[in-house]
């Protein structure tokens, strides 16, 4: 076992590639394979939009950000402004938000390596889980993507990969969750994996069952009915109060310089407008901004 905290880029890539080979032979025992040899790259930096990411599978993603879809971005912003800040936005303002956020996320991903199938990030250096466990999760994403295509339901994607990981580690999906795991992540990964386990574990070949369209339809139905709304609520609450990305933008973007010095509603409006969210700025300026201003203050600690 190599010490990842001090290992060179080459050593980490070598160790991760060997883990991938082991995972592929583990999957072959179940008659499940990948038609190509995945290309793996180690990047000694944090993932640009989510600093806790250990590894990702960029090919599965569209436009560099796995989780960016126009529909979910729109629904997310509408819920945040409405439910958490008591502000209402027109359809035009929401269109503008979606356009801007898509652009901002693309700009944040200059380092995304388009040719890699698996990217391993700097965080792996401090990771307590063995590399093989992280890789089995990522390789499963590739297999599922090749066999089933892109899924609309991220609970089946993450829950499925977590179930496979738990099976590989011979523990239950719940046991994989760390003690400080935030609620939305526990729902997305571990609780979804428990439901998947309940459905496919009795089958002769659970991994093949997880790729079977009829079984996936049953899993999706269960996940939407039993986890989806709790996950959405927990995700929103976590993001609004802890958004790493918003905090980074507000702490560094020149548009927020005046707000950082003097965090008033007027300075926030000017910052939002200067950042390119003109319609949003115009619309919220005439509403009660107490809650949004307080949240922005809290996020950047002023
Ligand atoms: Zn995953």
Image (spheres, rainbow, N blue to C red):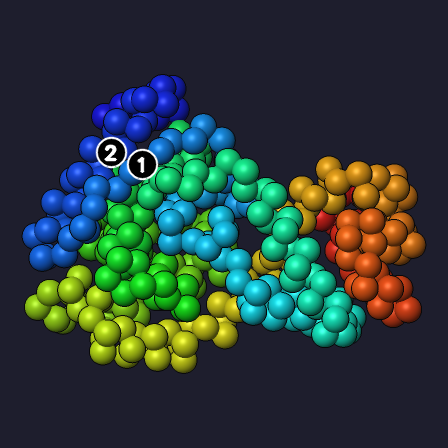
Q: Secondary structure at mark 1?
A: strand
User: Does residue 298 lie above or below 237 as drawn?
Assistant: above
Crowding near the residue tagged with mark 1, few <14, some 14–19, many ≥20 C-alpha atoms within 10 Å: many
Q: Position of residue 57 (x, y in %)?
A: 37, 47
Q: For this rendering, which residue is in front, 31 or 288?
A: 31
Residue plotted at (81% across, 43% down): 255
* Disc 2 from disc 1: Cα separation: 7 Å
Along the polypeptide, which appears first: circle 2 or circle 1?
A: 2
Is residue 121 visible in the rendered image? The answer is: yes
Label ID, residue 17: 2
Residue plotted at (32% across, 27% down): 12
Residue plotted at (15% across, 64% down): 208
Q: Position of residue 280 (x, y in %)?
A: 79, 63
- Verify CB contact (< 8 Å) between mark 2 and mark 1: yes
Q: Which residue is mark 1?
A: 40
User: Does residue 212 lie above or below 126 as drawn?
Assistant: below
- Quarter of the view holding residue 226: bottom left
Q: Is mark 2 within 8 Å of ligand 1?
A: no
Residue plotted at (41% across, 76% down): 224
Q: For this rendering, which residue is in front, 81 or 233?
A: 81
Q: Is residue 86 left or right of residue 233?
A: right
Q: Is residue 121 left or right of residue 215?
A: right
Q: For this rendering, which residue is in front, 275 or 135?
A: 275
Q: Is mark 1 within 8 Å of ligand 1?
A: no
Q: Quadrant of the C terminus?
A: top right
Q: For this rendering, which residue is in front, 261 or 102?
A: 102
Crowding near the residue tagged with mark 2, few <14, some 14–19, many ≥20 C-alpha atoms within 10 Å: many
Q: Quadrant of the N terminus?
A: top left
Q: Position of residue 148 (x, y in %)?
A: 27, 65
Q: Position of residue 176 (x, y in %)?
A: 32, 51
Q: Secondary structure at mark 2?
A: helix
User: Does residue 52 lie above or below 101 as drawn?
Assistant: above
């Amino acid at each position: 076992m190599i010490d990842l905290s001090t290992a060179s880029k080459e050593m980490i890539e070598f160790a991760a590639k060997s883990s991938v080979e082991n995972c592929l032979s583990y999957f072959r025992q179940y008659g499940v394979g990948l038609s190509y040899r995945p290309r793996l790259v180690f990047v000694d930096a944090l993932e640009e939009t989510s600093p806790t990411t250990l590894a990702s599978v960029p090919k599965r993603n569209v436009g560099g950000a796995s989780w960016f879809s126009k529909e979910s971005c729109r629904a997310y912003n509408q819920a945040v402004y409405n439910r958490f800040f008591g502000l209402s936005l027109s359809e035009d303002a929401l269109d503008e938000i979606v356009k801007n956020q898509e652009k901002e996320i693309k700009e944040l991903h200059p380092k995304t390596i388009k040719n890699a199938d698996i990217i391993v990030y700097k965080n792996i250096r401090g990771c307590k889980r063995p590399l093989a466990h992280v890789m089995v999760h990522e390789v499963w994403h590739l297999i599922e993507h090749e066999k089933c295509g892109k899924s609309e339901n991220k609970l089946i994607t993450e829950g499925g990969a977590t179930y496979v990981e738990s099976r590989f580690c011979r523990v239950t999906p719940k046991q994989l969750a760390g003690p400080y795991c935030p609620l939305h992540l526990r729902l997305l990964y571990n609780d979804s994996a428990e439901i998947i386990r309940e459905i496919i574990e009795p089958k002769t070949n659970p991994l093949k069952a997880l790729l079977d369209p009829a079984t996936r339809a049953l899993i999706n139905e269960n996940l939407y009915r039993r986890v989806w709304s709790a996950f959405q609520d927990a995700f929103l609450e976590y993001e609004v109060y802890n958004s790493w990305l918003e905090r980074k933008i507000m702490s560094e973007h020149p548009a927020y310089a005046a707000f950082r010095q003097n965090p008033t509603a007027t300075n926030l409006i000017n910052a939002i407008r200067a950042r390119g969210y003109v319609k949003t700025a115009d619309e919220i300026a005439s509403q009660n901004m107490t809650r949004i201003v307080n949240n922005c203050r809290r996020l950047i600690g002023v």
